[in-house]
Every structure is written in structure tokens, then in C-alpha cells.
Image (tube, rainbow, N blue to C red):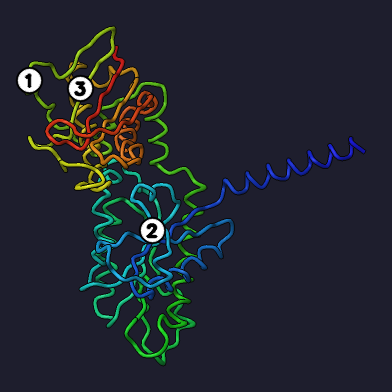
Amino acid sequence: MKKQLLVLLTAVLIGFGVNAQVKSSETNVLVLIHSQNGGTYKMAKAMAEGIQGYPNTKATIKRVASINSKEKLNAEVEKLPIATIEELANYDGIAFGSPVHFANISADMNYFFSKSIPLWTSRALEGKPATVFMSAGSGAGKEAAILSFWNILASHGMVIVPTGIMGTATLDKSVPQGNTPFGSTSLAGSVGTRPSASELNLAKEQGKALARVASGLKNTESGKEVKTTSVESKGNIDVNKTLKDNNIVLPEAPKPVGNYVPYTISNNKVYINQVALKDGKILNPGKVGATVTEEQAKEATYQTMLNVIAVLKEACGGDLNKVKQCVQLTGYFNTTPDYTQHAGIMNSASNLTALVFGEKGKHARATIGAASLPINSVVEIQAIFEIE
């Protein structure tokens, strides 16, 4: 009897293992929206339905944070989780939804993308499929708004999935509809229930199309993945080429303003300390949790790490290929006493280091909160590198 139970338990565990393996190959698609009154959210739900209608594909609906914290949102929309700009790189495809504001995307969605510089410089979204859907009160400007959204996605190197003439066979032509060849829209201010059944059906078809492209790309080796693999390999790495390929421009190494040197070398270890200096001024000065937002702190941290690498280049005699290993990064953050999300901010520095140096950029790390920092910088980074 015990032997039979053992066999049964083993079979169950194997079954769980198979399921886990299937789940890991699942295509994950994000539906990211800004919606105030709920019209765009209804379109998002239809989009998600279409996405999940494609085999082995999961859809997640999230929203961008509101610029105006006092903005009154639809009750269902308010319950949606808020996305961060960094997490976009974790999905296999993304559907973006926004209301039309003056033939453009909403200010809230535009502000969300204004924080995407680290994603752009690291080419984190390059090759990912994306599609756009919108909601327009009068219907005016909807196509111009979608195309303006495409400009942002194209700048990130994303693969844009349009709608073409999909869904038109079942379109109710007796009432005005928001269909476009670029993406589904809803005439929110038109007669009848909005979004209409035809508009929701088009959004569903658009979701299926995105899922099909995302699934196909996920199961093929893209050029970017090949390049990343070579960068992260332990073989010969041309760091200068990596900087060029990822459009990373190092600033001029900051000069000391006191009785100290920008770096020291001991036993092939380079010791560097830098703050968020950019063009001679501190970038986003102040305290996180009070006068500085997390996104501003991440931008300052990214800039600080650029300064560290610029100084490191001087220490290497101008040749960053002499770097053998990033040994340790320590981030000091100017925060309020109750702030605890230091690690999330420090990721901006860690991600940049790993991108530039590949395997050699993987490091030990510490993050520390501080009551104040020199010249009111929000961050100071202490770095230790081993060089040849």
C-alpha cells in the first residue's frame, strides 16, 4: 500500500512539473491604459478577451498613474494596479489604450512615457510587438492620435500591429463606429451604448492579432536577443561597441571640487564615488518621499552611474575593455525616514552596469537611506571595479 501511495505521489509531482513547464512558456501581454470615465477600460477588457483567446496567452490589464492625484476615476478603473515604466520590458507584447486629447494621447499617458529614457537607451522594448486603441468623445482626431502614439512606439523600436480591415465584415454600418485601419476606437460621445458591440468586437480582433504576433516572436530568436547574448557572454566583449549600439553617451568625467581625486586604484581595484551631477548641476535635487518622486530619483541614479562609468573610463586609460568585474555598488539615497523602496531606485544603476559590461557587470550591492547628501543630491553611488 505504501509503495502504491509513493508511486501515486510521484505521478502527481511529475504532473505539477509538467504544468509548471507549460506555464513558463506562456506568452504574457500587457494591456496598459489611461481611462477616466471607463470607456477605454471597456475597450481594454475586450482587447484582453481577444488576447486570451489565442492559445497559451495571458493578458494583464493595468493603468498608468494619474497626473492629478485628485482626479475622480471610474470605480472599476481605480481598482486597477498601476504599472511602472520598468515593467514594460517584462512582457512579450503590449496594447496601449488612451482617450483622445486634442488629436493626441492623454497627458497622463504621455507623462508615463516621458520616464522611459532608460528603456530607450537600453533598447529594452526593441522588437516587442505593440498595438494602440483609443476612445474619442467626438471622434475627431482619433487617427492622428493613434499615429502620434505610433511615433513613441517607433522610437522604442517596437513592432507595431495595426488593424487594417479586420472586423469590418461584422461592422454595424447603420450607426457611426470608431473603426480605423490603425487601431480600434470608440466614439464615446455618439448615440447608443458606447463602446458599441462593433467597436468591442474590433478591439477583440485586435487583441487576437497582437497575441498571434507576440507568440510568434517569443518563439523565435530575434536579432536583439542574439546581440544581448553576445554582450553577456564571458568571451571578448567590446564595451565601446555596446555603448554605441545602445546609444549610451558617457558624460565628461566630473572634476573634483576639493582636496581629493576622482578615483584611486589599489591591487587592481578602482574605487569611485559620484553624485547626480549633469552639465555642472545636480539633477533632480532634494529628498525622495518629499520633494523628489521615485521616477526623478531613478533618473538621477542613472545619471550618477553614467558619471561613475565616465570616471572608470579615465581610470582604465580610456579603454573600458580593461574592466574585469564590477565588484560592488553601494547606493546612498536622500530620503524621508519612513521611505523603504531604495532597492527599486538602485535598479537603474544596476541595470545600466549589467547592460554595459554584460557578465562582468554583475555585482554585489547595498542600498542605504541617508538624512542628507552632499549638495542636496538625491543619490550618491560608491563603486568598486576590478581592472586588468
The local crowd at label 3, few if under 14, some if 14 to 19, many if 20 or more residues have their Cα within 10 Å, is some
Q: What residue appears at the point 15 percent right and 40 percent down from the top-left corner?
A: 283
The local crowd at label 2, few if under 14, some if 14 to 19, many if 20 or more residues have their Cα within 10 Å, is many
Residue 23: x percent and y percent? Answer: 60, 49
Q: What count of labels does the image hold?
A: 3
Indicate the secondary structure of the residue bearing disc 3.
helix
Name the residue carrying label 3. Answer: 313
Q: Earlier in the sequence, mark 1 or mark 3?
A: 1
Tell which residue pokes out farthest to the right in this image.
1
Query: Where is residue 345, by image quadrant?
Result: top left
Please tell me whether residue 246 is drawn above or below residue 195 in the rendered image.
above
Residue 348: x percent and y percent? Answer: 30, 38
Q: What residue appears at the point 41 percent right and 60 percent down from the top-left corner?
A: 62
Name the residue carrying label 2. Answer: 130
Q: What residue appears at the point 54 percent right and 57 percent down from the top-left corner?
A: 57
Q: Earlier in the sequence, mark 2 or mark 1?
A: 2
In the image, 233 versus 340, the foreground residue is 340
Query: Where is residue 180, by image quadrant?
Result: bottom left
Indicate the secondary structure of the residue bearing disc 1.
loop
Q: Residue 258: which numbered mark, if any?
A: 1
Left or right: 256 in relation to 358 = left
Tell me whether the residue at label 1 lies in contact with that at label 3, contact meaning CB atoms closer than 8 angstroms: no
Indicate the secondary structure of the residue bearing disc 2.
strand
